[in-house]
Image (cartoon, helix red, strand yellow):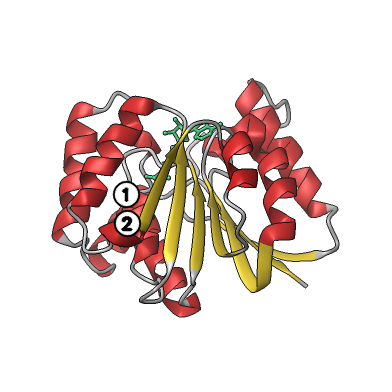
Amino acid sequence: MIITNSLAEKYAEWLTNNDDELLTQIHQSTSQNHAHAHMLSGHVQGMLLTFMSTLLNPHNILEIGTFTGYSALCLAKGLTVDGQLHTIEIREEDARIAQENFNKSQYSKQLFLHIGNALEIIPTLNKTWDLIFIDADKTGYIKYYEMVLPLLNKNGLIIVDNILFHGQVLEEDIKGKNAIAIDNFNKHIAQDTSVNKVLLTVRDGLLFIKKK
Ligand SMILES: C[S@@+](CC[C@H](N)C(=O)[O-])C[C@H]1O[C@@H](n2cnc3c(N)ncnc32)[C@H](O)[C@@H]1O
């Protein structure tokens, strides 16, 4: 199912600030060399992440699902001068590429890349978070959410990607384990009265969640 208007998308690409040199380079090299390049957040979503991070000016950011490091670098732009971004990636090869990209960044000393399963790593970080970006395996979303919600600071924000799952959650008969997992996550959030939420139909659907 096509859930975006390609003309509107192109227009948004045009009107949105350009990526900086490093982000442009990561986008290009991921597109050219990675079999799953579509997983990268992309220019307009990346700029939205930067906007939100800059507005919040977070001290601690947690990202679940680093891939090649694009979204982490978008989020890092809003960090306080002494702030930290911790990002978790299970695939060693993606983590290696991300670390190479982080090493080229002005935020390199503020970026902490953890390799392994986020469900095991998050409890070891012993931190609370101002901004959390959930963008890893879809079947883990409910567990990630339940694990990080108690660690979200007052006025903190959780952003969750792929909430529309390529339009598959809009189908009457939802098929495939990832689409079913996202649908279950969405129903889980819908019935959680302890949080405020808003779904933006940007790209594959971005959900913003904040404690009441
Ligand atoms: C959609 S990609 C992340 C894209 C990235 N946030 C960006 O916008 O550029 C999802 C990533 O999560 C990683 N991942 C999947 N399961 C994971 C887990 N249990 N723990 C940590 N990372 C995981 C995948 O290897 C993949 O690189």
Viewer-nearest residue: 138 or 165: 138
Of 188 and 109, the residue lying toward us = 109
Judge left or right: residue 89 versus residue 96.
right
- Tell me if I can see residue 12 in this picture: yes
Q: Residue 33 placed where, x, y %? A: 19, 28
Measured in 3D between alpha carbons, the distance from the residue under mark 1 to the one under mark 2, in whole angstroms, is 5 Å
Residue 205 position within the rendered picture, expressed as x and y whole percent measured from the top left: 54, 50
CB under 8 Å between discs 1 and 2: yes
Q: CB at mark 1 closer than 8 A to ligand 1?
A: yes
Q: Is residue 75 left or right of residue 187?
A: left
On the image, numbered disc 1 is attached to which residue? 70
Measuring from the top left, give residue 88's x and y in whole percent.
47, 42
Q: Which residue is mark 2?
A: 73
Vertical relation: 87 (above or below) 180: below
Where is residue 100, by image quadrant? Answer: top left
Question: Foreground residue, 117 or 78?
Answer: 117
- As displayed, is residue 58 above or below residue 114? below
